[in-house]
Structures are given as structure tokens and as C-alpha cells.
Image (cartoon, grey):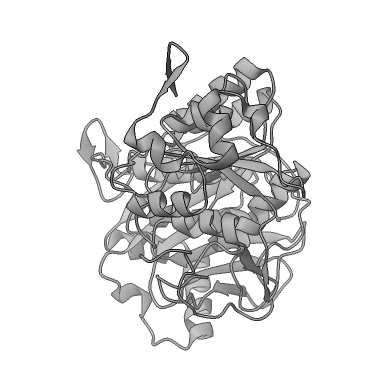
Amino acid sequence: MMKTENKLTLTRREMLGVTGLAGLAALTGNAAAAPQSASAKPRIACLVTYWGATRSHADWIITKLLDGYWWEGAHTPSRVEVVSVYIHQFDTSLLAQKICKSKNIPIFKTAGEAVTLGGKELAVDGVVIVGEHGEYPTNLKGQWLLPRWWIYEKVIRVFEQSKRAVPIFNDKHLSYSWDEAKWMFDKSRELNFPLTGGSSIPTYFRKPEIELAVDTPLKHSIVLGGTLDEGALFHSVDVLQAFVERRKGGETGVKSVQCIRGQETWKWTGQNPWAGKLLEAVRVSFGLKAGHFQEIEKPNVCIVEYNDGTKAAVYNARDVGWTFAGEINGQKDQVVISMLGWPGPFDQYHASNSQPHWITEMMVTKQEPFNAERLLLSTGITAFNMESNWENGRYSPVGRRIETPFMNMKYRSTRGPQFSKGERPPKMPYVRGFDE
């Protein structure tokens, strides 16, 4: 906020969100003037690129932090308090403006002001970054240049200045850039704060409702899902990592990544019978006709080799939601687990129900819901998949195999099952508290 001779100068943007006691504190630059709620819920700053449509990730996630979410067959009230918002593409985020005005949540001009509540020091208990959607360019390699690192770096500046840090959730992958993503992860370790994020798909309802046991002797894996662009690919890669991190010996890191596009996809599959075998297991499980997956218009496969010799592939596919299939040593039949049946795109409970549960769990407990190394590996696999088909300015449908010795993260997963169970949420319109 701007001060001139102790008088406040407010823009239309500042007036829109700065109301109530929290707004008064923001205007005076005194974060302590905003009392915490009687229940002492963690106070959260939400920093987003765009929040102008009901199908935007910001709307899916933040409205559930405001109003509660569906978990284990019932509506669960929110366990956090959203006290500030920053919107990078403010002018097109009219939905956010209405929501924040109706709920007396201040919208700040900068990310730094949102986490300090207009003061000079960190004044919130957690940060949620939703850098998904909005008008941003895509580069030649198909990477969407969303400013997630740019927003995150502004928060880190405040952490370092305040000499303390709080948990951060970062929606989807950390960045399109490995260098940026590694910096983001390293800062969480340097400043000792919990970090989580990624896709909501690994925590969605499953069929069957099972989780791989820790130390499962997993030999080969595939994931089928829509992977036509970088954002869609990440969902499938994150599903893969959520399963393979539970293999015997734990995660050992990624040795190489390669992307093959077009009909060469099936040539590679024929040369790697384990992949074809797992594809067939999924086809049979869904009762699809022979050759179903080979009929897709734009086939592609992301090939991942791990440091312990484990191999995996992520295929562009249709009619199977997001499906994992794995070959387990000593087990005759392949395991097939699917995430299916999402309600319609404008439904109040569409997407990101279990994800806000784990966001709030981290904010309350100050513990990462899963190893943040998984988020970094999923980010890296996605980034190098997009790099694979390009070399020295030339494109090839048979991408180069990129060795990734720097992706040598090692850890053992200790988490339990995190996916939604029980009755699915009802299909009902959003309850906004105002007329849209």
C-alpha cells in the first residue's frame, strides 16, 4: 500500500478487497492489528495467476479453502482462514474480485504485500500458490510460461527478510524449468519449511480402492491419460510418481527421460514387450476392443528409467481416465488402478477436494503430506520430456534420451493412502454468497 504524509492513497484495486478488520490492518501496515479467529485457524495467503472462471484451478482450490471440501464421504468445514489474495492477472479475474469482496478478503497489489498483510514482516501461517491458467505464452517446445517461480521467489524474499518461513503449497509442477524448480525445492530445505503441490489426481477416488504397499517389488509401470500438452502430461507423470515411489528400496531418482511422438510410439512399444503387456492388461480390464489405444489420433510416450533399473512409460490415451498398471515381481497378474468418473466442469465439488484436505493438513500440522522430492521429480520428468524432441533448434518425433544424473533424489515413502474414499460428492452448483 502507498502512504503519503500519513494519508492513505487507495487505487480501485485496493479498495475492492481491503475491508473489515483484516483490511484495516493491511491499510495501516500493522499485521498485528488483524486479530486471529477464535479457533486460531492457520491464516493463509493465496497468490494466483488468474481467478476468473469456475473451471480455473484457483477457483477449484481456494473456494474449498474458504467454504470446505468433500472428504471421506462428507463435507468438511475449512480448517484454515484465507486472509489475503494476490492476483497477477487482476483485470480479467472478475470472479475473484466478487468472491473476495463478498468475504471481506483484501486483494493486494503485490505478492509480497499479500504475505506481509501490507506490513514489513511475514504475517501469515501458510502460502498457497496457484499459478495455473491465464493469458501466458507457450514456447516452441510446448512449455507454458506460467510465472510460478516468479511468485514463489517474491515469497522467499519475505521469508529471508523476516528470518522465518511457513508452509507453501504450489499447484501442479513447480516450474516449466528444471533450474527454477530445483531452486524452489532447495530453498524449502535451506529455510526449513514444508513444501507440497502437484496434481490432484493421485488423491482422487480410485478403482479399486487400493494403495501399493511400501516396498512393493515393482518392476515395470505405465500410466495412461491425456498427455497432449505439458499441463496434461504432468497429471499423468505425478500419478506415476505417486505409485513408483512405493517400490522396493524406495525412490532412487531418475536416470533418463525420453519422449517419442507419433506412430514411432508403437514401434518403441513393440521393442519393449513389458510396456505392451501392461497396455494389454489395461485394455482387457476396461473391456476395450483390440487395438483401442493404437487408434488414438496423436500418440506419444514419455519413457522414464530410474537409477535402480526400474522402467516406466506414460502414454497419451483416452477412455480410461488416469490409469496406472504395474508389473510386480512374483505376482502373476498385473495391478491396474484407475482414477475415474469426475463430475462436470462447473460442479461445486468438481476436482481438488482431497487436495485441499492435504493442503490444510500441512498448514495445520506443519508436515509435508508426502516427500517434496516426489514433486521435484515429477516436475523434472515433465520438463525433460518437453526438451527431448528438440536439439540444436531441430525437432524430431523420436526424442533424444536425456540423461539426468542431477535427478538423483533418494527417499523412502512413509505416507499412508491419501486418496478419497467413501460416497462421492453430490453434483450441485456453486454457492457463492452473491449473484453471478
Q: Residue furthest left?
A: 394
Q: Position of residue 40 (x, y in %)?
A: 76, 45
Q: Is residue 166 left or right of residue 99?
A: right
Which of 67/264 is in front? 67
Q: Nearer the viewer, residue 34 or 174?
A: 34
**Residue sitting at 64 percent across and 36 percent down?**
409
Q: Quadrant of the C terminus?
A: bottom left
Quadrant in the rendering for residue 17 = top left
Count of numbered tags: 0
Front one among 4 and 62: 4
**Vertical side of 3 occupied by 117: above or below:** below
Question: Residue at 32% across / 47% down in the picture?
Answer: 134
Between residues 32 and 121, which one lies in front from this camera angle?
A: 32
Report x, y in % for residue 352. Answer: 54, 61
Check the image and report above or below for 202 versus 391. below
Drawn side of residue 350 relative to residue 55, left or right: right
- Position of 406 with respect to 251 (left or right) is left
Place of residue 118 in the rendered image (x, y in percent of width and height, measured from the top left): 53, 26
Residue drawn at 70 percent across, 47 percent down: 362
Q: Residue 208 vs residue 141: left or right?
A: right
Residue 151 vertical placement versus 329 (above, below): above
Q: Is residue 386 visible?
A: yes
Inspect this view and state whether residue 221 appears. Answer: no
Q: Position of residue 275 (x, y in %)?
A: 49, 65
Residue occupying image coordinates x 33% and y 51%: 94
Q: Name the image quarter holding the N terminus.
A: top left
